[in-house]
Amino acid sequence: MQIWHMEPFPCGDRRLPHHVFPPKKITADQLLQLTGVQYFKVDLDDTVAMKKRLSRVKNERKVNSSDMLTINEATQDINEKVGNSY
């Protein structure tokens, strides 16, 4: 996983990296301290283990609902969905 500061006004394809220059990468711990966003790694190929991990995290944080969105090149209206993520 890579985390970096984005340029303030990205232009072009938003799926491409928009590093500030020179690139300023941060760690997962720094991301948590700066934004409260926590990183969890799951194995997408092992769906049973992934579901158990997600359930455990949700229970620990008392989360009752969640959304999972999978986007790939075959997704209809991919550009609109990617644009809505920003």
Image: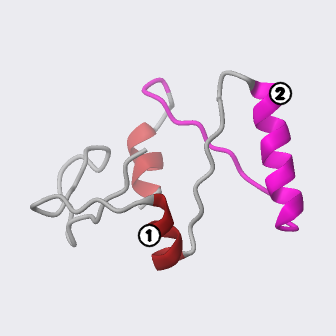
Percent position of residue 50, x then y: 75, 35
What residue sits 83% from the left and 57% below the top?
Answer: 58
Of labels 2 and 1, the one closer to you: 1
Residue at x 48% of width, y 30% of height = 72
Q: In this view, does 56 lie to the left or right of 39?
A: right
Give the amino acid at mark 1.
Gln
Q: Residue 48 carries which label?
A: 2
SS assignment at label 1: helix
83 up-or-down from 68: above or below: below
Depicted 72 relative to depicted 66: above or below: above
Is 49 covered by the magenta stretch? Answer: yes
Q: Is residue 34 above or below residue 18?
A: below
In the rendered structure, which disc, 2 or 1, sits on the residue that comes first in sequence?
A: 1
Occupied quadrant, residue 73? top left
Residue on which the image places disc 1: 30
Provide the residue span drawn in magenta: 47-74
Q: In the rendered view of the protein, which quadrant contains the C terminus?
A: bottom left
81 relative to 47, above or below: below
Residue at the left extreme of this rendering: 21
